[in-house]
Each structure stands twice: as structure tokens, then as C-alpha cells.
Amino acid sequence: MIKMGKNIVQKILDSHIVEGNPVPGQQVGIRIDQTLTQDATGTMAYLQFEALGFDKVKTDLSVSYVDHNTIQDGFENADDHKYLETVAAKYGIKFSKPGNGICHQVHLERFGVPGKTLLGSDSHTPTGGGIGMIAIGAGGLDVAVAMGGGPFFITYPRVIKVELTGSLQPWVSAKDIILKVLEILSTKGNVGAVVEYGGPGVKTLTVPERATITNMGAELGVTTSVFPSDEITLEFLKAQKREQCFTAIQADQDAQYDRVITIDLSTLDPRAACPHSPGNVKTLREIGPLTVDQVLIGSCTNASYRDIMLVASALKGKKIAPHVSLGITCGSRQVLEMVSRNGALADIISSGARILESACGFCIGNSLAPKTNAVSVRTSNRNFFGRSGTNSAEVYLTSPEAAVAAALSGKICDPRDLFSKDSYPSIKIPSEFLIDDSMIIEPSKDSSKVQIVRGPNIGDPPSNEPCPQKLSAVVAIKVGDKITTDHIMPAGSRLKYRSNIPKYAEFVFEREAPQFAAQALANRNKGIHNVIVAGESYGQGSSREHAAICPMYLGVKMVVAKSMERIHRANLINFGIIPAILSNPQDYDALNHNDELVIDNLRDQLSGGSELIMTNKTKGNSISLKVELTDRERAMILAGGLINSTKMQR
Ligand code: MIC
Ligand code: SF4
């Protein structure tokens, strides 16, 4: 038998499989080496870690970051921070304090290791793919299980190779590469795939540039994206004084791929993702010139040392357009301290920019909401409707190059139309980054001495009852295609309730149907089950498991959709909500808000196979649903979620 070579994805995954076989489309359980959490999903992850009864983390490394909720306009955020700090100290987890930076960037700088697996309770965890990790986003409960040493289950992926040739022209950057990939692959239909980058163009990109690409790869809906680990990776690790972590990882010459896409970097034009989807990509020359009101540079996509230095060099000695508000966030304290010591921060300040804390900030919509009908240019990765905090605002996602051009000229324009080729700043990775890990707190050596602090904002994780034998439900809401978890569970000003499920649940589908939560709760209290009906790609975007927990709390038992995204589907199952797919997509049209639905023998039907027959009593017809579950998933659904099924096994 001829042995075929392996691609990078296969190399890393195969060395981590603990259950199942490496066959595309089949479920495998993989060992997780590292985990990360952030505060907005972290409190629930650690409450569940406690509920599962583990006494220590069993990973090589687990880090808890605070970067999302740092506004502290009340006691809630600070309560969460203290809980996270003390729970980390007790269970063997490093704690990165607020102000130390955005989880993905700090993790890349200080902890990422080529060839290892990383599971994070944030959908942009694939940022770690920039340093050659298989880094995957998941719900907090899955991360809790992985911290306890349990495997993480994924569909063994199809691998799409993106072959990069040539090199980028001045003023065109890594962001334009991922925007091009989004243009080709779009934000839907990529579930179960991983993107692997290769080809000679890879050598022209530094680790932070690669990380921009794998970070925003999350918007494709793929499981993750990964780059090789090579001499450029080594150079980055050396500059972070972590060269001992280096391993070279390359695809074999004869590696196989399910699809190959080639992008010639030298022909790429600067682009933007236009409102309201990261997949709505156009070149800047197609869009502009368009007057802008706000420019925000930062987020886990584009706030590395290279990005901020580039922006500072372009701003040096100039003033931004008077009608523009420019905000700049460094991705980590390392970057902020370096640019303040080398004087670049002074150039930024003098241009008229506002300096923001090293945190998610504007990206999660908890600050700097733009004015009514604003045009806002941002270097972040998501421009979903309303995420900025202003529903009427139009958000364009671009590179730092294009953002700084917009701030100076006051218009969206191709930066090559504003700056000359020769003026393109050449920013190199420094030979030594400034290393100071003093804002990362080590866990306690004696956990028995640690008291976990639970302020009034820390609730209990809600429980669910086992799946009923008969579903007697109503269609509590009917939504369209590409509904994101931001639509289901808004973040922004509501974020501070993440640790308090009954309160946060009041805002489910707040923007789609303000009455939804109250009605669903009233149904639940009358013993009527709730069903959500949706179109294609339900649950895109953020990994927030609150988009499953809060509906569960409101008595939602099933989501019926044309198709569903990976992380959200897993979260629904973890909380005992049935993820049902319409066998005939056209049945969607005949389902309406308030229709009465019944499934007799629900438990028996779920146990017996993958088809459910549901009666629509209002319309007097039957609808066939596909519920394809592995044995493990079926046990969770029947038990009413993962916590219940784990307790039953003990
Ligand atoms: C996001 O970018 O949407 C978030 C906020 O980082 C989320 C996590 C969350 O909702 O807490 C994510 O990407 O998973
Ligand atoms: Fe934070 Fe934005 Fe990155 Fe999410 S996408 S982790 S909110 S910076």
C-alpha cells in the first residue's frame, strides 16, 4: 500500500486523537494541550468546571484572560474579575489581569506553541494558527471539560489549502488576504473544514500577520486555520524569548487536500468587508470615496506591534481629518509599552487620536458606539448589524493601512491613492520584544488556602430537565438566514449580565423580537415548550454559549433550521436543545410564528434513529426533521445536557 504524505492539519490532529478514526466527516476526540478563556465566557466556563467537580486542571497550560468586560460601570464586571482571579488561583490556571491585553494576542505572544492543540471559549481562538497550532473555538462547557482532561470532539475535517504566491505590494496587507479568502469561500457552507496556508508567499508574512489571517478565518465558519511553523516562527519565538517552544511543522510534499485555492499576493488590491457581514467584500476603489465619521484601529485581528507601528509611522507629523474620531487600541500591554517607550505613541497622540485601553473595547460594542447613520471604519473582524452599539451605523472592516488612510483623508479610499509607494513604512519584527509577565498571576501553590470570591453578580449555572417524551410546543420565533449569536444574545451594554442567566435571558433576540423573552418565559411557566425556526447557517459568529443557555432557561427545547454552524450546534447539544435540520428546506416556508407543534414519542424517536416526525397542528401537516447525533450527543440530549449526562455517568 502506498503511504500518502500528510498535511499540517493531519499531522497535528493525528498525534492528538484519543477516540475515533481520522476519516473526514467522522467524529474524533482529541487531547487538548492548552486552554484559554476570556471573562465574558469564562465565568460560565469556570462555574461549570466547578459543577463538574474537577479538583485541578489537567492541561499543560490553561490561562484565564480578562479583556471583554473592562468598562466597570457598576460592580458587575469587577465581581466577575475577582471570581475569575480566585477560581484560577484555586484550580491551577494562570490569570491575565485586565489591562494586560486581548486574550488571543497575549496568548500568541507569550504562550502559543507550534504543533500543540489549543481550545478557547472564544471563536477567534484560531488566531493561534498563526504560530502553527491547531487552535479551536468552543463553548465554555467544552472548555471546562477539556480543562478537566476530557477530550474535545470535532468532525475530522476536510482540508482546504490556500496556496500563497508572490508578495504583497506596499499598502496592501495581511487583512486583504483574509478578505480575499472570505470573498472566495464566503461565510457559509464551510462547516467541517480547516484552512491550511502554504506556498512561497507564506515566507513573506510574519507571525502576527499570519495570525491576522487565521483570526479572521473564524468568519468563514471553518473549524480553524493554520500556517506552517518555519524559520519565521522561530524568529518570532526568539524575540519573545521562547525559542525553546519551537518545532518546525511543514506539510509533506505529497500531502493531499480536498480543495486548493491559489492567491497571487502581488495582484491583490486593498479591500473592505461592507455592512453588515464580514463576507460582503469589495475593493476600496469600488466603495470609495465615502466620507467617514469614525475610525477604530485595534482588536485581536489588527493590533500587533507591527500594525500599531505602521499606523504611528503613517500618522507621524500629520493631523487627522477634523470631522473624524480616531481611536487606537494596542492588542496587548507589551505593544502599548513598547510604542510608548519608542516614541510612536507620541506620534499617535499628536495626530489627534484617542488612546484606548488594551482590551476588546469597541470591538464588542461596549464603548465608542458611533453616531446615528455613521460610517465607521474598523480593523476588527465582525460588522454584524448592531454590534457597534448603533443600529443605523455602517461598519466597514479594513486593514490598518486603509484605516489610517481614512482617518487622514476623512474618506474610505485605497491607501495607494493617498500615499506614495516609497512612503510605505517598513516595520520589522523587533529582535527582542519587551517581556514583562507581571500582569499574569500564577496559580496558588496551596489551593486549600484559596477562597473563591463570589460577589452578587455570580449566579449558579442553570440546570435543565431531561428531554420530555412528548414535545408540545409553539414556534416562539421565526428568523431568516445567517442569524448570528450576536442576534440571539446581544453583547455590548448587556455584556455585564453574562454571569447572571435569568437577567441576561431577558435580552434574547432583543433586536429581532423585543417580546420574545417575556413570551417564551410565559410559555415555559404554562408548560408549553418553545421552538426556534431559522434559515441557513443559524448561530454564526461568536462562541458565546449564552446563545444556548439563555434560550434553554426560557424553555426552548428545539431549534429547527435549514443549516447550523458548528460551535452553536455543539452549544445547543451541551445544554439539551435539539438541533434539528429540515429534511426538506422548503418546509421552512410553511412554518410560522405561533404555530403549534407536537412530537409524540420524542425520546423514542431520538433513540431510534436520525429522523423525527413533527406535526404542525396549526397547519395540519407533518414535517420530517433530521437530527444526526453521535451516541455521546444523543446521551446529552436525552439527559437534558452535558452536566446532567456527566452526573448520570458517575
Ligand atoms: C466576539 O468577538 O464575538 C466575542 C465577544 O469575542 C465572542 C465571545 C463572547 O461572546 O464572549 C467570540 O468571538 O466567541
Ligand atoms: Fe475581543 Fe473583538 Fe477579538 Fe472578540 S473579536 S476577542 S470581542 S477583540
Image: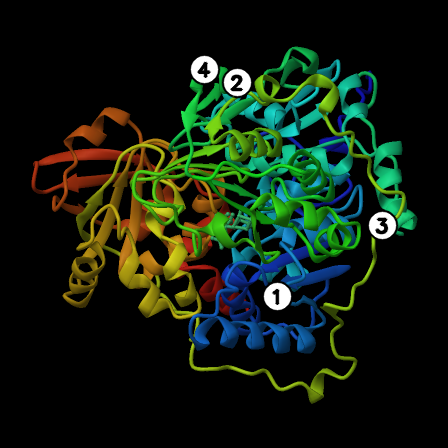
Other residues around mark 3 within 10 Å, as few (<14) / some (14–19) / many (≥20):
some
Q: CA distance from mark 3 to mark 2?
A: 34 Å
- Which residue lies under the disc numbered 4? 286
- Estimate the x, y position of residue 407 in percent, counting from the top left: 53, 35
Q: Write down the quadrant of residue 612 in the picture.
A: top left
The residue lying toward the viewer, choosing from 444 and 285, is: 285
Which label is found at residue 98? 1
From the Cβ of disc 2, is ligand 2 less than 8 Å away?
no
The amino acid type, in three-letter code, at marker 3 is: Gln
Residue shown at the point (44%, 52%) measured from the top left: 368
Which label is found at residue 184? 2
Q: CA distance from mark 3 to mark 1?
A: 21 Å
Whether residue 384 is visible here, answered yes or no, is yes
- Which residue lies under the disc numbered 3? 240
User: In the rendered view, would you say 468 is above or below 237?
Assistant: below
The amino acid type, in three-letter code, at marker 4 is: Glu
Q: CA distance from mark 3 to mark 4?
A: 40 Å
SS at badge 1: loop
Colour logic: rainbow
Residue shown at the point (23%, 58%) measured from the top left: 517
Q: CA distance from mark 4 to mark 2?
A: 17 Å
Mark sitting earlier along the chain (3/1): 1
